[in-house]
Image (cartoon, rainbow, N blue to C red):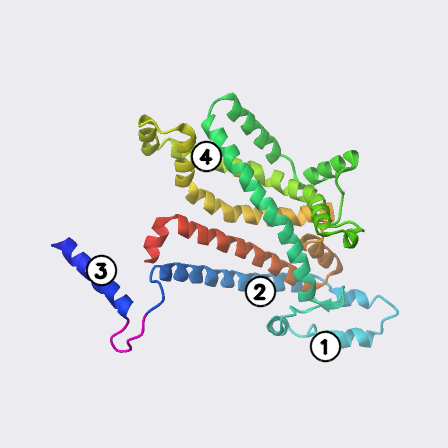
């Protein structure tokens, strides 16, 4: 009786969606299966916007509480009249109380320039977007390669649990975990100086404009090798250990033992069934790995002279360029939220429990 009612109700619902509303007679083109996904993504997007707003308030308050600013140092220059400095303060709202300063800065956000950088004599937005592109050019390949190395290496270590291969992998990851970012970057720079094969700084060479398309790609790849290698080596140990731990837990599950008893091949069981079962914690780790890569890239970019957000943020802090500091922090937060948004979307598609909660 109940299955008949369920099938009938499902058939009526399908007929309604196919024929449209009886009042309007229009066909509904929206797929109902995509509605929970859009609801989930909109909710995550709303959470991200709240985080971005909170970061903007906190970064604005902390930078405003710091003693002095760029205009305070301009007073020490005898070539600049005090009236000029006072006029600049009035023009950019720096003479107002903190809440009004924030509202004045929000107005610049609405205009799309994110304030004015006194150190570079330019709107902040025009400085941020090229640097953010360079940071993405570094972190996206580093993230991809780190995961492409970590997943098979962690799976192999899990399959060799307790053997010499597992011990060797555990020792190597432990050694890499103990190396600070600064030391690792300097070691790679020393390697580049000794071998004279890879460039030790910058993003492109001086003759980049004279090269052809393939020559430009090769030159960019050579400059990208050292900073990307530093980021991969900094994050690879954590990823390998998490992949190993997740797969060890899955390999001890009853369905794995039953599959082995039925004669399923070990390689197929490990790299297809076990990895699929361990996808949820690994996708959750993806968002954390993106955060770790972005934080490490700030240091690596400064060491390797890569023109990304890291050197720009350090220069803005040294120059007390408050609007540029806030803009760089917000841009880094936006990249982090975008990476976590992608990880959340992949986790939703991989985890049926999330889809059931949103249905």
Task: Tell me whether circle 3 and circle 4 mark residues in contact (CB < 8 Å).
Answer: no
Measured as percent of width and height from the top left, residue 347 is found at 43, 50
Residue 244 visible in this rendered orientation of the protein: yes
Question: Which of pointers 3 and 4 indicates the residue nearer the eye?
Answer: 3
Q: Residue at x 71, y 62 (%)?
A: 67
| Mark-to-mark CA distance, 2 and 3 | 50 Å
Q: Is residue 47 left or right of residue 25?
A: right
Task: Tell me whether circle 1 and circle 3 mark residues in contact (CB < 8 Å).
Answer: no
Q: Is residue 272 left or right of residue 195?
A: left
Q: Return the mark for residue 245.
A: 4
Could you tell which of marks 4 and 2 lies nearer the N-terminus?
A: 2
Location of mark 3 (residue): 10
Give the overall secondary structure of the magenta segment. Answer: loop
Which residue is most to the right?
79
Could you tell which of marks 3 and 4 lies nearer the N-terminus?
A: 3
- Assign the C terminus to one quadrant of the image: bottom left
Q: Residue at x 42, y 44 (%)?
A: 280
Task: Tell me whether circle 2 and circle 3 mark residues in contact (CB < 8 Å).
Answer: no
Which residue is most to the top?
164
Mark 3 burial class by Cα count in 10 Å: few <14, some 14-19, many 20+:
few
Q: Is residue 3 left or right of residue 96?
A: left
The region drawn magenta spans 20-27
| Mark-to-mark CA distance, 4 and 2 | 39 Å
């Amino acid at each position: 009786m109940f299955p008949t009612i369920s099938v009938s109700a499902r058939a009526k619902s399908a007929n309604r969606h196919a024929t449209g509303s009886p009042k309007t007679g229009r066909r509904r083109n929206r797929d109902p299966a995509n509605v929970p996904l859009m609801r989930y993504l909109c909710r995550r997007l709303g959470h991200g916007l709240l985080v971005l707003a909170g970061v903007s308030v906190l970064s604005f308050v902390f930078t405003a509480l710091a003693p002095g600013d760029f205009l305070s140092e301009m007073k020490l220059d005898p070539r600049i009249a005090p009236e000029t400095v006072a006029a600049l303060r009035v023009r950019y709202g720096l003479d107002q109380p903190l809440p009004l300063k924030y509202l004045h800065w929000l107005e610049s956000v609405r205009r799309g320039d994110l304030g004015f950088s006194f150190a570079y004599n330019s709107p902040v937005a025009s400085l941020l977007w090229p640097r953010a592109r360079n940071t993405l050019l570094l972190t996206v390949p580093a993230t991809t390669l780190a995961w492409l190395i970590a997943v098979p290496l962690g799976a192999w270590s899990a399959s060799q649990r307790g053997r010499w291969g597992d011990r060797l992998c555990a020792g190597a990851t432990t050694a890499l975990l103990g190396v600070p970012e600064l030391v690792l970057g300097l070691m790679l720079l020393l390697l580049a100086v000794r071998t004279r094969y890879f460039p030790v700084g910058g993003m492109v060479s001086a003759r980049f404009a004279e090269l052809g398309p393939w020559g430009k790609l090769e030159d960019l790849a050579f400059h990208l090798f050292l900073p990307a290698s530093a980021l991969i080596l900094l994050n690879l140990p954590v990823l390998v250990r998490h992949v190993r731990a997740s797969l060890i837990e899955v390999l001890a599950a009853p369905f794995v033992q039953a599959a082995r008893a039925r004669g399923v091949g070990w390689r197929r069981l490990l790299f297809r069934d076990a990895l699929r079962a361990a996808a949820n914690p690994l996708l959750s780790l993806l968002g954390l790995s993106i955060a770790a890569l972005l934080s490490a890239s700030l240091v690596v970019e400064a060491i390797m002279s890569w023109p990304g957000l890291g050197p720009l943020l350090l220069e803005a802090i040294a120059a007390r360029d408050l609007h540029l500091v806030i803009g760089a922090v917000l841009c880094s937060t936006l990249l982090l939220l975008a990476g976590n948004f992608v990880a959340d979307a992949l986790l939703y598609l991989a985890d049926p429990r999330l889809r059931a909660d949103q249905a």
